[in-house]
Amino acid sequence: MRIHAIQTGTVAIKERQRRGSGRGPLRLINTIRDPNWTEPLPILAWAIEHPEGLIVVDTGETSRTSEPGYFPRWHPYPRLAVRMSVTPDQEIGPALDRLGLSSADARWVVLTHLHTDHAGGLSHFPNSEILVTRKEYADASGRGAKVRGYLPHRWPEWFKPTTVELPAKPFGPMERSMPLTEAGDVVLFATPGHTQGHMSVAVDTGELLVILAGDPSYTERLMLEGAADGVTTDVATDEKTLAQLRALTQQRRSVYLPTHDPESPARLAAALNGSGA
């Protein structure tokens, strides 16, 4: 197997989004009102060259975010708390081409969740099986989806994902999981908190467990510190997931790779070089 980090542009967010404060609606208000911005953070997706087929984890962002009206004008978060920068050549399709891969060859696309910076590149995968948890798809497409920060009206018309209900099958300390591959070396597991239907992906190389996390935290350090983010609606669930992830990384040699951690690509390369994978 080979695992590639793919950067699809950058996003700047408020510092309070990385480490939140307050409970309930006040948490999001505190995030939006924070005057302090992060540096531009990577928007990462991942490609796994697997014997059973090419697996893509998240699709990154689309350059269409720069178009007027792409985000709902009435929603304060995209107006006041996020700054996207994505060019057409940074989208995941051209990025895969530069790796000598093709979006047309992706057997599976796994979406950790359906926020636009993870699902914005869906248009590049019309022929792939796209997997998302049933809870995530319901929250992202149902009543109030736009209020919750989803953009279902921007999904391709053909988008009909395979929705999965992760069974109560432990994966280390994680409570719900299922294998994606017949070999059992790529596993989907539930990581609710950032969104209630969030899932992450683990790739077992034999010597190393590669955790393609999505957004349980914005950096490895924040996971280790158990710091819930500033947009979660359920701090207790977020903190529980972070504690379980911390325990998972302590059970065996692992590398934890959140989507917006600037150190994730280098940490992956160093870990794979050290494992001989």
Image: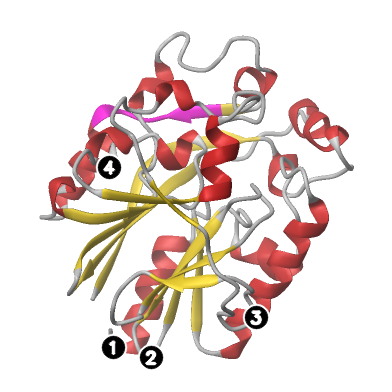
Q: Which mark is residue 173?
A: 3
* Element assignment for label 2: loop
Relative height, residue 200 to residue 15 (above, below): below
Of the numbered discs 3 and 2, the one sitting upstream in the chain is 3
User: Is any part of residue 227 visible from this angle?
Assistant: no
Which residue is the site of mark 2? 207
User: Residue flagged by tag 4: what amino acid is it?
Assistant: Ile
Report the span colored magenta.
Answer: 83-88
Which residue is the site of mark 4? 92
Which residue is the site of mark 1? 276
Give the distance between the C-alpha atoms of the residues marked 4 and 2, in whole angstroms: 29 Å
Of the numbered discs 2 and 1, the one sitting upstream in the chain is 2
User: Residue flagged by tag 1: what amino acid is it?
Assistant: Gly
Q: Nearer the viewer, mark 3 or mark 2?
A: 3
* Element assignment for label 3: loop
Q: Nearer the viewer, mark 1 or mark 4?
A: 4
Question: In the rendered structure, are the residues bearing label 2 and label 1 in contact, judged by CB atoms less than 8 Å apart?
Answer: yes
Of the numbered discs 4 and 3, the one sitting upstream in the chain is 4
Question: In the rendered structure, are the residues bearing label 1 and label 4 in contact, judged by CB atoms less than 8 Å apart?
Answer: no
* Element assignment for label 1: loop
